[in-house]
Amino acid sequence: MSIIDIVLGALLLFGLIRGIFKGLFVEVASLVALVLGVYGAIHFSYFAADLLESKVDWNEKTINIIAFAITFVIIVLAISLAGKALTKLADFAALGILNKLLGGVFGALKIGLILSVLLIVFNKLNNTLPFMEQEELEESILYEPVKSLAPMIFPILIKSEEEQLEDEV
């Protein structure tokens, strides 16, 4: 067991434990809140910008940044509150244990997916500028399974990226 296995294992365990404590609904809500918060802030921050323009005397760049931040925070808070409300409902309906267990699985998968993307980038960098010996990576227990998580979940994205790289060469 190498140092990379210890680091990957600790991070996956962190995701599992965090997911167990928060539950499935809060874990999913946090991911959805982040994605929808960015999307909503990009597409709907002009509502907040119009309101700010009529109330304050700031330059346009400042208003746009503040409007983006306000819209993002409102969306994230609304979705997070909905996730917490669903968790309370699950506890009330005696689904608390299931919610916690599935939250742990989802939390570990979420961290695993993030690590997978980072390991794919690390692998490409390691081929150009070696940080670790290839045989050390091959001996690792967790490196390949975690690295293969993103291509397994999003095969279409990975294939289109590979095809795009082949077209450039």
Image (spheres, grey):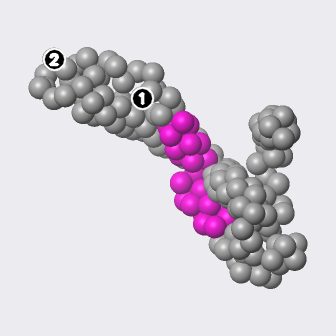
Part of the protein shown in magenta: 11-35
| Disc 1 secondary structure class | helix
- Residue 152 placed where, x, y %? 83, 46
Q: Which mark is residue 54?
A: 2
Is residue 84 visible to us here?
A: yes
Earlier residue among tags 1 and 2: 1
Tell me which corner region of the image, top left, top right, bottom left or bottom right, holds residue 115: bottom right
* Mark 2 neighbour class, 10 Å CA radius: few under 14, some 14 to 19, many 20 or more: few
> Which amino acid, mark 2?
Ser
Magenta stretch: residue 148 in it?
no
- 20 magenta-colored: yes
Determine whether the residue tagged by mark 2 lies in a helix, strand or loop. helix
Q: Amino acid at mark 1?
A: Ala
138 and 142: which one is in front?
Answer: 138
Image side of residue 10 versus residue 126, left or right: left
Location of residue 63 (image quadrant): top left
Q: Residues within 10 Å of mark 1 (few under 14, many from 20)?
A: many
Above/below status of 95 relative to 133: above
Image position of 40 with respect to 145: above or below: above
Q: Identify the residue shown where x is 57% and y is 47%.
A: 27
Residue 123 appears in which quarter of the rendering?
bottom right
- The residue nearer to you, when weighing 125 against 32, is 125
Residue ID for mark 1 = 41
Quarter of the figure that contains the C terminus? top right
Give the residue at x 84% y 63%. 144
Distance between the alpha carbons at the discs numbered 1 and 2: 19 Å
Quarter of the picture holding the N terminus = bottom right
